[in-house]
Each structure stands twice: as C-alpha cells, then as structure tokens.
Amino acid sequence: MMMTSSLKVDIFDIASDLTTRPVGARARSVLLEMLEDNETIEIDFHGKSLTPSFADECIGQLAAELGFEDFRARVKMLNVSESSRPLIRHVVLTRCNPL
C-alpha cells in the first residue's frame, strides 16, 4: 500500500541535542517509525551543527537501513547548517557504499 503523506519533523522534538551516538540512535528509530506511516519526512535541523557521531548514527545509519535511493526519495533535510552538509554527505555515502 502506497502512502501519500509527508510529515514535517522538528529534529529537537526527537533529539535533545545533536551530539551523541545514543541520541542519534534514538532519533533514527523514531524517524524509522515515522517512515512506516508516511511516504516522506522533512527533518528541520534549524541550522544547528551536527557532530560526526550524531550524523553517522542518525542520518548515516538511516540511509543504510533504507538504502540510498529510498533514503534520497523519502527523507528531506531542511535548514542543514553549511558546516554539516559535507559531513552528512560523507556519512550517507560511507554507510551506503561500504567498500
């Protein structure tokens, strides 16, 4: 069954901060649950910087679980800080292409 909804997610509603692996893991599991009920999700990062640990655990692992194409089609990231963009790109590509 194909869903047609899109859900806007405030990152701070599901993560107390954007720093640690445990917080990133919890945020990832919440995002996965949201993706069960919604075709796409839009995550608003409010221009805040992510640590490599949080980015890898939350975003990188999410991309790995969904697969690169599904991740790109279903997960939109809004207001990502300029400094976090290369980091997010790196963790997604690293997790989706484990060479």
Image (cartoon, rainbow, N blue to C red):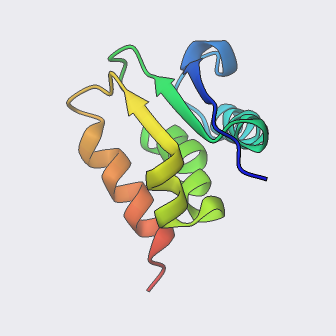
In percent of the image, x 59 and y 43: which residue is there?
Answer: 58
All told, the count of numbered labels is 0
Residue 54 spot, x, y in % from top left: 53, 38
Res. 50 visible in picture: no
In percent of the image, x 59 and y 48: which residue is there?
Answer: 57
In percent of the image, x 67 and y 31: which residue is there?
Answer: 23
State the image quarter where residue 49 is shown: top left
Residue 32 spot, x, y in % from top left: 72, 43
Residue 6 spot, x, y in % from top left: 58, 29
Is residue 99 placed above or below 29 in the rendered structure? below
Quadrant showing the C terminus = bottom left
Closer to the camera, 76 or 48? 76
Q: Residue furthest left?
A: 82
Res. 7 visible in picture: yes
The reply, left or right, for residue 35 in relation to residue 6 is right
Is residue 86 placed above or below 27 in the rendered structure? below
Is residue 67 placed above or below 29 in the rendered structure? below
In percent of the image, x 41 and y 33: which residue is there?
Answer: 77
The reply, left or right, for residue 19 in relation to residue 7 is left
Residue 9 spot, x, y in % from top left: 58, 20
The reply, left or right, for residue 37 in relation to residue 71 is right
Closer to the camera, 1 or 7? 1
State the image quarter where residue 29 is shown: top right
Q: Residue furthest bottom?
A: 99
